[in-house]
Amino acid sequence: MIRPVPWVAPALFLLCLAPAVELAHGLYTNALGPNPLETLTRDTGKWTLRFLLLTLTISPLIRLFQWQFLLRYRRLLGLIAFQYGTIHLTTYLWFDQFFDWAEIWLDILERPFITAGMSAFVMLVPLALTSSRWAQRVMGQAWKRLHRLIYVSAFAGLLHYFWLTRADFLEPAIYAILFALLMLARIRRTTTVSAGES
Amino acid sequence: MLIRTPRASDEKEFAVTPRKLYQQRRQFMKQCAAGAAWATAGWLLPSESSASLIPSNPKRSPYSTTEEWTDKQAATHYNNFYELGYGKTDPSRRAHMLITEPWTVTVEGHCEKPGTYSVEDLIRSEEIEERIYRLRCVEAWSMVIPWLGVSLGSVLKRLQPTSQARYVAFQTIMDPENLPGQRRDVLDWPYVEGLRIDEAMHPLTLLTVGMYGKVLPNQNGAPIRIVVPWKYGFKSIKSIVRIRFVEEQPPTAWNRATPHEYGFYSNVNPTVRHPRWSQRRERRIGEFGKRPTLMFNGYEEEVASLYAGMDLSKYF
Ligand code: HEM
């Protein structure tokens, strides 16, 4: 067992915040291009997806390399994903819709990509709320089951990305392949475990 | 608003010269020049560069809006020009990859004057006007751009379309060796667009060679493009190499890619729901808030009659 290094978690936290700081700085210095609000929405969307996938990488790494110490950082990564998702949603509600709730509701109903994005975000809310060690302890097996929602959320996030893409599907395809690999790692484990048990 | 019906004399301003004739004439001139002092030959020949087309003091147009121009930096660095890349900043970064010299436009189909033309064959410097138009992208952003060009109709008329010419089809340059965007099948290359003949002949439709008082930057569709201000931006096809007069409605690039999202007409219309972007509002680039999108992008008075009796939610 590798001993916890005290400064790693805060350092990781700051590193994860770097994109947000850079975006805020870019916004302030007008360095986000001719349509800064679009840049903000798109970049935060991408970071949400990236952090969701990063969060999903932890368990396979632990299993493959017995890097138990990584477990400590999974919650942080998940919460960072939620944080970028919250900023992403806020930029949409504010700069796209200016809190016109009727229009937003219509958008959720009418536009498949918004429906998917919204579903992806809504699923993250209970996960963020039950992310504490305390909730994990109290909920036991139910916690595990509930937190499998992250798979569905990431999948909905990918759908969202595919459905909003006009023509160039290269980048969403790369994320989709990463997601598929991460899911495959889990399925393979389940089958090998059950094979070993029988 | 004033609609100038083109006078019959417009057609006779000058006859367009097919490329072959033009080249023969140049050859002849060259020979004459060779006989004369070589030093004078240079300026006897017409310049090839379309930069020389741009008049220093272009005519103003009654069609111009008085709205504030979009910052030139934004209009030249926030572009959709998939031939040069699929991101908004790719076209300006890779502008040099579009080779614009030499450039010819092939005119074919149902017309009396088919042939291969240079940009200078099609457009004369004296005719060029400045037209300040609103540009509305289907992605719900807009700009105000001072274009330099001539009414497409005046040029098409000189090519003498026949009665069979019911549509005009346009094609962008196809050059996958140099244009990185064309090396992947994100669209069915080359980019094609089309207009109904009355849309093409409408005085608002501009055959464009410049913007902001200068020759068109490559990323904005050099050396020659059209601008159709009442339609979503993708209808205003860039870097045109082929104009064809046809009888049937021609295929168009985005319609081919996603037919339920992009119709042949693609008139700016805030009431037609689009599966991707609400078209009710738009962000004028450079502004924080959004403004309501206007029917036909604010050119309703000029163009609504083109679509009289048509169900615009069906012919979107
Ligand atoms: C977990 C949740 C979400 C993820 C992973 C996610 C991810 C993404 C990604 C990857 C992009 C594309 C970025 C790009 O093309 O550069 C994007 C764009 C966008 N997302 Fe999300 N998103 C999520 C939730 C939402 C929600 C809840 C909304 C609004 C209700 C939303 C609205 C948008 C909009 C409006 C765009 C820009 C579309 C465009 O520019 O055409 N997203 N998102």
Image (spheres, coloured by chain):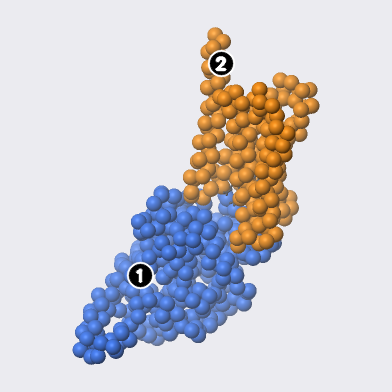
Chain identifier for the blue-coloured part of the image: B
Rendering coords of residue A113 (x, y %): 59, 44
> Mark 2 falls within which chain?
A
Name the tint of chain A in the rendering. Answer: orange
Q: Badge 1, how many Cα within 10 Å: few under 14, some, many 20+?
A: few
Specify the quadrant of the image occupied by residue B22. Answer: bottom left
Q: Check the picture and name the quadrant holding the N terminus of chain A.
A: top right
- Disc 1 secondary structure class: loop
Q: Position of residue B189 (x, y in %)?
A: 38, 54
Q: How far is mark 1 from mark 2, CA to CA? A: 66 Å
Question: Residue B14: percent from the left, percent from the top?
Answer: 35, 84
Report whether B243 appears left or right of B35.
right
Residue designated by label 1: B101
Question: Any mark on residue A83, and which?
Answer: none
Query: Residue A101: horizontal and vertical position, in percent?
Result: 73, 50
Residue at 63% x, 60% y: name it: A31
Q: Secondary structure at mark 2?
A: helix
Please tell me which residue lies in front, A121 or A101.
A121
**As displayed, is residue A111 above or below residue B95?**
above
Residue at 67% x, 32% y is: A74
Q: Which residue is mark 2?
A: A193
Residue A150 in view (yes/no) = yes
Vertical arrangement, residue B72 with respect to residue A93, above or below: below
**Residue type (three-letter) at the residue carrying disc 1:** Glu
**Amino acid type assigned to the residue bearing label 2 in the image:** Val
Q: Nearer the viewer, residue A73 or B287?
A: A73
What residue appears at the point 42 percent right and 77 percent down from the top-left corner? Answer: B51
Q: Is residue B91 left or right of residue B36?
A: right
What chain does badge 1 belong to? Answer: B
